[in-house]
Image (spheres, rainbow, N blue to C red):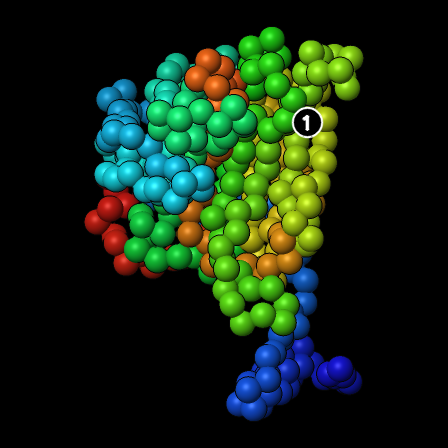
Amino acid sequence: MIRCINMSPTATRRHLLHLACAWTALGVLTWIPIAHAEPVVPGNGFELPGVGDDLEDRQWQYRPNGKKSSRNIDERERGPLGRSANGRWSEGPHRGQPDLIKRVPTPAHGLPGSEGSLLIRTLHPGIPGELTHKPQQDDLILDVQKRLGRSVPPSATPSCVTRVYLPPLDEWEDRSGSHFGFRLDTWGRRKLSLKTEQYWPGIFINFRSQSDSRFDDDSAFLLIRANSRGMDIKGPEIKQLGWWTLGMSVCADGQIHYYASPGIGDLSDGDYLTSQYCYGYRCSRVDLFFFNVVTTDDGRTRSTPWIIDDPTFFTTKQIASKSRSSLFR
């Protein structure tokens, strides 16, 4: 065990780095301790232009571009992938996009001045032309890496924020379980591992159906993915429907910080939920953020209709773009 006594923070970091370099030179795996950073409220810092979308363009369109991908089930990618006309949204190669992606008028009590939001809903998740009769997911992606031409490191304290409209409970798919997710695509390394791996933290909206014998009434709650062992964490009960604000941030220590609040107001310290080394990973980069829509893959059941508005990406440090021409479309 390394003990550092009577050292300044700078000297301590220098000492640990020298030891790490020495051990690495000997071929020994190192894990340099980093002091836990204070959580940063999502939405602090600089909004990255051209990465999110305020959805105020009346001509906003999305082009599905054929059959959706289903690499998560059958290892099949079916290009060309769907994308929006403004280049900000896309289908991912891992799972397909929702079947309905449409700009709609912003529901009541939305963000001031907002006239347009995005409705996402799906009927045929999973493998095109096949049914699994299990809950499956579709994704809609905002690709930070492609828009910037680079990933974003935790040292820049990246964060993302969205508003999501929760409809009356009688409009939700009649199924207990996850219905919606707001997630990050991140890469990181576990302790005592040299391998950098991809993982997907997120905030899910879960439903309890009164048609399920376990529950007396319809209700909903937030679910956090995930703790250091990869287990989901139950979040607060949803007592208020309509608009909610969700956000996640990443700090220099590689932890994911989760926030949520009913309404449309900016997130604050009081909206803090938890901080986690998700799946045991220390985050080393953020590539994108995205939305999950979940429904039963039976060819008949439509997902809960979700409306999102103003998904936005922030950093506390200015990030130089390697793809500057794409940022101002």
Quarter placement of the C terminus: top left
- Left or right of 8, for residue 21: left
Q: Residue at x 54, y 27 (%)?
A: 134
**Outermost residue to the left:** 325
Q: Residue at x 24, y 46 (%)?
A: 326
Toward the viewer: 164 or 222? 222
The amino acid at mark 1 is: Phe
Q: Position of residue 10 (x, y in %)?
A: 62, 80
Q: Residue at x 56, y 91 (%)?
A: 26
Quarter placement of the N terminus: bottom right
Q: Position of residue 127 (x, y in %)?
A: 39, 31
- Left or right of 172, for residue 60: left
Q: Quadrant of residue 281?
A: bottom right
The tally of labels here is: 1
Residue 206 against residue 38 in the figure, above or below: above
- Left or right of 135, for residue 213: right
Q: Position of residue 209 (x, y in %)?
A: 68, 16
* Residue 21 visible in rendering: no
Toward the viewer: 288 or 313? 288
Q: According to the image, label 1 marks what residue? A: 221
* Residue 253 visible in rendering: yes
Q: Position of residue 249 (x, y in %)?
A: 56, 48
Toward the viewer: 126 or 93? 126
Mark 1 secondary-structure assignment:
strand
Q: Residue at x 60, y 64 (%)?
A: 190
Toward the viewer: 125 or 139? 125
Q: Quadrant of residue 224?
A: top right
Q: Residues within 10 Å of mark 1 (few under 14, many from 20)?
A: some
